Image (cartoon, rainbow, N blue to C red):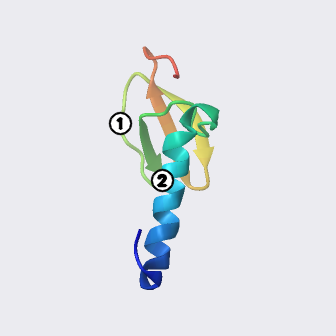
Amino acid sequence: MTNGDNSLYNDIRNIAIYVYANYDLLTDPTHGALFYHADYVNPKWKNMEKTAVIGRHIFYNRKDLKAI
């Protein structure tokens, strides 16, 4: 949609379109997490369940919610 000077924009746009069009085929690596933080912080969250660790980021969901 844009000229060659914006190839990065076009690449990102194409990825976004792919994700939107194929959402039901993709796997959520966070297992439905709604919250996350880096491993160097320590939030005082209550009622949270860890769902995944990706690199230095820890992902959580509320214990009373089920992953989608």
In percent of the image, x 52 and y 59: which residue is there?
A: 14
Give the side of residue 39 with respect to residue 55, left or right. Answer: left
- Secondary structure at numbered mark 2: helix
Three-letter residue code for mark 2: Ala
Tag 1: Cα neighbours inside 10 Å, few (<14), some, or many (≥20)? few
| Numbered marks: total | 2
Q: Given the current orientation, which residue lies at the most extreme bottom position? A: 5
In percent of the image, x 42 and y 34: which residue is there?
A: 34
Give the side of residue 38 with respect to residue 51, left or right. Answer: left
Quadrant of the image occupied by residue 48: top left
Q: Position of residue 31 (x, y in %)?
A: 58, 31
Q: Is residue 67 above or below residue 17?
A: above
In percent of the image, x 60 and y 44: which residue is there?
A: 53
In percent of the image, x 44 and y 17: which residue is there?
A: 65
- Secondary structure at numbered mark 1: loop
In this view of the protein, which residue sits in the foreground, 6 or 56?
A: 6
State the quadrant of the N terminus. bottom left
Mark 2 against mark 1, which lies toward the viewer?
2
Measured in 3D between alpha carbons, the distance from the residue under mark 2 to the one under mark 1, in whole angstroms, is: 34 Å
Tag 2: Cα neighbours inside 10 Å, few (<14), some, or many (≥20)? few
Q: Position of residue 41 (x, y in %)?
A: 42, 52
Q: Position of residue 23 (x, y in %)?
A: 55, 37
Say whether disc 2 or disc 1 marks the residue closer to the N-terminus. Answer: 2
Q: Residue tagged by mark 2? A: 16
